[in-house]
């Protein structure tokens, strides 16, 4: 009997691991096809900051920006998530950019005079669907740079 339970556990763990790998691959494909072109004319920094989020979820990421460079922060999300907003906060929690109050709701271009850290907070809005299954999809936070 023990052998049977451990075999079932192994199969369950394998299925979960394969599902996670499949989701990561789908997100990577989405980022390459839909998000990478939007980072231009900036050079992408090489980091892939991607999460799978559902309706109503929030995520954040701390990033360091170096003096003397121009940057673009791009937040790219799959359509089924609906409205995805983001804020940039300094390390004291002061909002320095809010995508809801901007003409370019999926990116922010800025120049850094002094090396500093920012927190990027991404929020997927609550779904208005009456379905018991919440929409889920990939969200990517990308950073592009160019010498200022």
Image (tube, grey):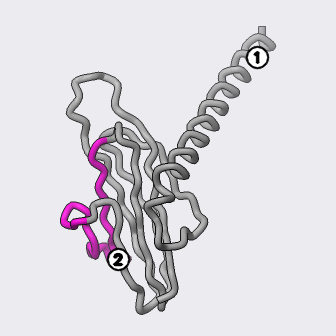
**Within-10-Å neighbours for mark 2: few <14, some 14–19, many 20+:** some
In the image, residue 94 lies at what x, y percent?
A: 27, 75
| C-alpha gap between disc 1 and disc 2 | 50 Å
Q: Residue at x 28, y 61 (%)?
A: 105
**Residue at far top of view:** 1
Q: Quadrant of residue 4?
A: top right
Query: Helix or strand or loop: what does disc 1 sit on?
Result: helix
**Within-10-Å neighbours for mark 1: few <14, some 14–19, many 20+:** few
Q: Quadrant of residue 17?
A: top right
71 relative to 4, above or below: below
Q: Quadrant of residue 12?
A: top right
In the image, residue 64 lies at what x, y percent?
A: 49, 77
In the image, residue 42 lies at what x, y percent?
A: 49, 73
In the rendered image, residue 140 lying in the magenta stretch gets the answer no
Query: Helix or strand or loop: what does disc 2 sit on?
Result: strand
In the rendered image, residue 84 lying in the magenta stretch gets the answer yes
> Which one is closest to the eye, mark 1 or mark 2?
2
Q: Which residues are magenta?
A: 82-103
**Residue at far right of view:** 3
5 relative position to 100: left or right: right
- Label 2 belongs to which residue? 90
The quadrant in which the N terminus is found is: top right
- Report the number of numbered marks: 2
27 relative position to 21: left or right: left
Q: Residue at x 56, y 37 (%)?
A: 23
Q: Are marks 1 and 2 in contact (CB under 8 Å)?
A: no
Which callout, 1 or 2, points at the residue further toward the start of the chain?
1
- Label 1 belongs to which residue? 7
In the image, residue 19 lies at what x, y percent?
A: 60, 31
Q: Residue at x 31, y 50 (%)?
A: 84
Q: Nearer the viewer, residue 60 or 78?
A: 78
């Amino acid at each position: 009997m023990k052998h049977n339970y451990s075999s079932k556990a192994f199969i369950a763990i394998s299925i979960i691991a394969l599902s996670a790998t499949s989701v990561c691959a789908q997100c990577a494909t989405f980022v390459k096809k839909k998000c990478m072109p939007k980072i231009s004319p900036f050079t992408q920094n090489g980091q892939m900051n991607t999460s799978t989020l559902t309706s109503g979820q929030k995520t954040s990421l701390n990033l360091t920006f170096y003096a003397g460079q121009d940057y673009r922060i791009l937040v790219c999300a799959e359509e089924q998530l609906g409205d995805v907003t983001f804020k940039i906060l300094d390390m004291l929690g002061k909002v320095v950019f809010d995508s809801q109050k901007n003409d370019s709701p999926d990116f922010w271009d800025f120049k850094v005079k002094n090396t500093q850290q920012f927190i990027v907070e991404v929020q997927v809005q609550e779904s208005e669907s009456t379905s018991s299954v919440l929409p889920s999809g990939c969200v990517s936070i990308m950073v592009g740079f160019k010498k200022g």
